[in-house]
Amino acid sequence: MEIRGQIQGDFVTIVTYHYVRPIKDSLYPDIKGLELQDFYGQIEYIMKYYEVVSMDDLVASINGQQELPDKALLLSFDDGFVDHYEYVFPYLLERGLSGAFYPSVSSITKCQMLDVHKIHFVLASQDNKVLILDKLNQYINDVKEQYELEDIEIYKHQYCKSNRFDSGEVIYIKRMLQYVLPGVLRSEIIDYLFTKFVTKDQVSFAKELYLSENQIRTMIGEGMHFGGHGLNHEWLNHCSRSHQELILTKNKEFLECLGATNNCMTFSYPYGAYNSDTLEMISRHGFDLAFTTKVGLADLNLVDNYEVPRIDTNDLPISFNAELVNWTRQLL
Ligand SMILES: [Zn+2]
């Protein structure tokens, strides 16, 4: 019997977080992330309506070894920020909860600033994004002949389009620097902008931004799950087959070395991007589950293990007394 507003199936809600920190009072109040107080509030909301499960529970249930509670929810944290050790981990411990964490290998093992985050901090460094846009376009114009690039207007027409999180200008800057321009040039421009607007000292910045291996080991020791998130946060669908193979092999080695694969091994696609090669390899390398950025609840009876949808922290309220959102209401 169908009850109005309720969806049929065996659903688990998986929430994605990135930055979780006291943002307003930080050096970068414009960084796109979740304010720490709002994280606390959101966990209150979640504990009121859901039952938080661990990754081991979820994998066991998908393999038919155990049943998940009604209204099961998994907390997932992408990008391996020190925020996750400093703020998230103690709070989860205090509340007796577990989470799943996805760092990219090079940020941890080499203290390397990932281009994706350099772009975030460049964008957060200026209220007026046009300043960054101008520097970017100026650079592109200067090397246009050398790299046989298109006219700026053509790029703008194609990529200056807002989405549910960002303005057209911000999307344009991100896309140009994420995959539109040739790889070598992209890194060169990102370094130029990062040096100009943020800092010259990338290693110190990375050490303050990302988890250390010791912090990860401590978290694993207290029951947190760690999975793969690329080497340098690559768009896997833009990588060659052999490069994808290398990325997955290195991710597996990294996780094995941390002792993170005892019960299960999972992956979160950077940018939610993958292709048919990725799906074949991720299965062959023995990953149990892989998470996308497709927005939705995962129906345990139907979900493909390597294309698991999630919702974003922005999709859920941030206080105990908040009105129910549709993602919650449809489960009641
Ligand atoms: Zn990521």
Image (cartoon, rainbow, N blue to C red):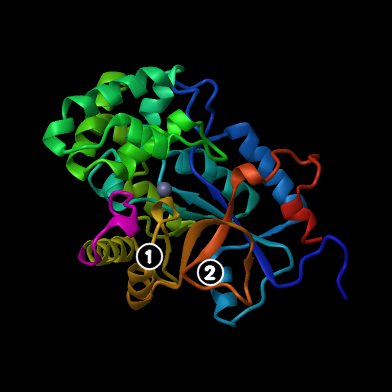
The residue to which callout 2 is attached is 56
Quadrant (top left/top right/bottom left/bottom right) for the C terminus: bottom right
Span colored in magenta? 230-242
Camera-side residue of 104 and 234: 234
Residue 199 seen in the current view: no
Q: Residues within 10 Å of mark 1 (few under 14, many from 20)?
A: few
Q: How crowded is mark 2: few (under 14 residues within 10 Å), some or many (20 or more)?
A: some
Which of the two marks, 2 or 1, is nearer to us in this view? 1
Q: Which residue is at 77% across, 61% downward?
A: 331
Decide whether residue 235 is among the magenta residues: yes
Camera-side residue of 88 and 79: 79
Residue 38 spot, x, y in % from top left = 64, 35
Quarter of the rendering containing residue 171:
top left
Q: In this view, does 29 lie above or below 182?
A: above
Q: Which residue is at 45% across, 23% downward?
A: 28
Quarter of the rendering containing residue 158:
top left
Q: Is residue 148 above or below residue 4?
A: above
Decide whether residue 21 is among the magenta residues: no
Magenta residues: mostly which secondary structure?
loop
Quadrant (top left/top right/bottom left/bottom right) for the N terminus: bottom right
Q: Does the residue labelled 2 lie within 8 Å of ligand 1?
A: no
User: Is 277 left or right of 64, judged from the image as shown?
Assistant: left
The residue to which callout 1 is attached is 275
Mark 1 lies on a secondary structure that is: loop
Give the amino acid at mark 2: Asp
Identify the disc placed on residue 70.
none
Quarter of the rendering containing residue 124:
top left
Asked if labels 1 and 2 touch by Cβ distance under 8 angstroms, the answer is no
